[in-house]
Structure formats: structure tokens, C-alpha cells
Image (cartoon, helix red, strand yellow):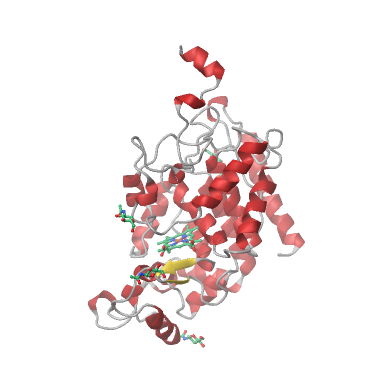
Amino acid sequence: MSSSSTIHFYLAAATLFFAALFHGPSPSHAQLSPTFYDRTCPQVTKIIRDVIYKELRTDIRIAASLNRLHFHDCFVNGCDGSLLLDNSPTIDSEKQSLGNNNSVRGFDVVDRMKSQLEKVCPGVVSCADILTIASQISVTLSGGPSWTNLLGRRDGLTASRALADENLPSPFDSLELLKQRFTKVGLNGDVDLVALSGAHTFGKARCLGFAHRLFNFSGQGAPDPTLNKSFLKKLQKICPQGGNGSVITDLDVTTPNAFDNAYFTNLKIGKGLLETDQILLSAPGADTADIVKKFSKNTFAFFEAFVLSMIRMGNLSVLTGNQGEIRLNCRVVNGPSTLSDDNLVSSI
Ligand code: HEM
Ligand SMILES: *[C@@H]1O[C@H](CO)[C@@H](O)[C@H](O)[C@H]1NC(C)=O
Ligand SMILES: *[C@@H]1O[C@H](CO)[C@@H](O)[C@H](O)[C@H]1NC(C)=O
Ligand SMILES: *[C@@H]1O[C@H](CO)[C@@H](O)[C@H](O)[C@H]1NC(C)=O
Ligand SMILES: *[C@@H]1O[C@H](CO)[C@@H](O)[C@H](O)[C@H]1NC(C)=O
């Protein structure tokens, strides 16, 4: 994007920051801050960017995958890195939940970011913040907007597969249910829902999430009538009846790897891949349709809204101050052996 629009996003983020300052953070509930690691880990952004940049050379999809990790983290118990925890005697991992199992990816890449960061600034950068930063850099490197991350999240001590099953949107949800899911976590069911769904401008999805649209939609013996005919033919070849539901295809058929507004221009010609994409425009009486139309005509309006919604999403139920911990390994909560000497002394 042009340098003037980039500046605009920095200004927008700065405005939010100063608004937060004048609101007066109470010490017990510290606020996120754009300068959080300036003294303790000034290299944090560069380290994360370098890992993504290198990974993109062999896996262009990783940008989308990292962006999705932040979303699936924030929608379950807030942005607390809970998604990254593996199964253990005390953790029922969210990775095995309905929306995540065999679907979310990029955990090894997050591990590489964390281990690099532990070498340079040990015990400083939370796994939750790594997801926030990686998500933004992935969008920016893919041609989307740039913005300033609000940082200072701490990592949670728990995960909940049940809550992940309950909260994560499914590609079979109605528009009403999508709206409910967004409002339940503290986002809104119109601009946040539409702008953040625009993340489906990159990345891939498995046949099992949209195959129900292709042959016998809602038991009507015909495909989803909102699907573009040529797009339908293409998808029927990729996902034949009785075929392998794990085969993947691009969410954005027009510019699969670029972060742009093609997701919205696709919806205008019946080329939304998921039913939950197309209904934002095509559900009868959808109040989201006007927002889709606006973003399809104006990339800048989409980028501006997307940045604000990403900041709002990144703000959901964050742990700050001395809540939670800074995990040393994103896959496990810190054990007693990771307590500092001070903690050991005071716990005796
Ligand atoms: C509105 C409700 C949403 C639904 C129903 C939904 C559903 C899905 C589904 C079914 C997939 C494909 C998963 C698979 O087949 O394995 C997917 C992929 C993806 N979603 Fe969403 N999603 C939603 C919102 C979001 C939001 C808010 C974001 C980010 C801000 C997002 C970012 C992504 C990305 C980037 C991918 C591609 C990931 C990859 O290629 O690894 N989605 N989504
Ligand atoms: C997750 O996927 C694996 C591999 O396909 C499968 O064995 C396992 O049963 C799945 N877990 C759940 C909870 O569905
Ligand atoms: C289904 O497709 C996935 C992804 O292409 C592949 O890894 C898997 O081996 C396939 N399974 C079968 C039974 O063909
Ligand atoms: C289907 O897609 C083509 C472009 O591939 C477009 O020209 C046509 O208008 C679309 N049909 C509908 C009904 O939107
Ligand atoms: C973030 O959340 C806090 C409360 O937790 C609120 O005071 C602040 O205004 C929020 N910031 C943004 C950008 O939504």
C-alpha cells in the first residue's frame, strides 16, 4: 500500500494508544501498549518477521495459517496463548477441538519464533503476543495493511477444548449464529464480522467445509443457488461426491495468496467458498450486505476496518500486569522447575 495510507494506519493506532493513556490505566489492570517491549526486547518484531519471511519461501500459505492462529486463540478464553498448549494431564488441548483438529497449522513455526526470542530476550515475550505480532506481519507481508500492535499480553495457565468447540465459528453456521458468536466474545456482528471474514482473502479450506453446497444443498437435490456456475463446476471437480474431504483449495479463487479485497469482489459474483462467506452478502435481508458491497468497491475502507477489528479482536480478555505468566515453551505451562530463585525462596 502507499506510504500515505500506511501513515494513516500508524496515526489511527497512535490515536487509540493516546485515548487509552488519557483514560488512565489502573495499576491492577494494566493496558496493552505499543511500546511494551521497546526496552526489554526491541528485536521482537524483527525476529518474528525473519522467521515468517524465511518460511514463506517454501510455504506461502503460512501467512494465512498464522493469521488464523491469532483468531482461534482470541475467541477461546481471550488472547492468552491457550490455543498453543498441547495435551497434558492438566490440559485438554484446544488443538483437538472440532474447528482446530487437522485444520489449524503453523505451531512449529511459532515454536521457532519462541526459541529465537528465548535466546535473545529470555522470559520476556509472551506466546499470546507472538501470535498477535505474527498475525499482523503475515497480513502486511501478503500485501495487506500495516499497523502498530498493542502488546503486553500474558499467557494463560489453562486451555479449554470444550470452550473451543462451543465458541469457534463453523462453516455451517447461519448468519444469526455467526453474529451471536462474535457478540458473545465482545465483537460486533456487523463490521467486525464482515471485516474479519475478509481474512479469507488468503489461505485454504478443506472440501468437508463446503462440499455440502456442491450437489445436494439442504436436501434440495441441487447445488447452493448462490454459487457462481463456473466456480461450482470447478469445485465439483476438486471435491467430487464421496471424495476425500481433506483435499484443500483456495479460499480466494481470484488472488489466493494476496491480502486484498478480492474476497469481497468474489462474493459479488457468487464466488465465496464457504457458505458462511457467501451469506454475508446473499442471505435474505442480511444487514451485512451493504458492508460487503462497500469493501468490494473500496480496498482502503476494508483495510481501515480490518485494522480496527484486528485491534479489537487482539484486545479480547487479555491477561496483563502480573496475571498469567510468560511461558518459556508455548506448548506447556511453566512448571515448578521454571520458577526463579526468588519464587522458590518465597514459596518455601
Ligand atoms: C466468521 C466466521 C468464520 C468461519 C465460519 C471460518 C471458517 C473457516 C474455515 C472452515 C476454514 C478452513 C479450515 C479447514 O478447512 O481446515 C477457515 C480458514 C481460514 N480462516 Fe476462517 N472462519 C471465520 C472467521 C475467520 C476470521 C475472523 C479470521 C481471521 C481474522 C479467519 C482467518 C482464516 C484464515 C486466514 C484461514 C486460512 C488458514 C490456512 O490456510 O491455514 N477466519 N476459516
Ligand atoms: C483429531 O484427528 C486425529 C487424526 O485424524 C484423530 O485420530 C482424532 O480422533 C481427532 N480428535 C478428535 C477429538 O476428533
Ligand atoms: C486425502 O487428501 C489428503 C490431502 O490431500 C491426503 O493427505 C490424504 O492422504 C488423502 N486421503 C486419502 C484416503 O486419499
Ligand atoms: C460468474 O463468474 C464470471 C466470471 O468468472 C462472471 O462473469 C459472472 O458474472 C459470474 N456470474 C454471476 C451470476 O455472478
Ligand atoms: C482494550 O480493552 C480495554 C479494557 O480491557 C479498554 O479499556 C480499551 O479501550 C480497549 N482498547 C481497544 C483499542 O479496543
Count of numbered tags: 0
Residue 60 position within the rendered picture, expressed as x and y whole percent measured from the top left: 58, 65
Q: Could one spot residue 335 in this view of the protein?
A: yes
Which residue reaches farthest right? 3
In which quadrant is the N terminus drawn? bottom right
Q: Residue at x 44, y 83 (%)?
A: 231
Q: Position of residue 78 (x, y in %)?
A: 45, 43
Query: Is there any visible trace of residue 36 in the rendered image?
Result: no
Left or right relative to 229: residue 155: right
Q: Is residue 106 left or right of residue 41?
A: left
Q: Where does the image place residue 258, in percent across and percent down from the top left? A: 60, 69
Q: Which residue does the image show at 49% across and 56% down from the upper left?
A: 68
The foreground one among 144 and 192 is 144
Q: Name the quarter showing ligand 3.
A: bottom left
Q: Quadrant of residue 58?
A: bottom right
Q: Position of residue 247 (x, y in %)?
A: 40, 71
Name the residue at 51% across, 69% down: 292
Q: In the figure, 121 relative to 216: above or below? A: above
Q: Left or right: 81 with respect to 93?
A: right
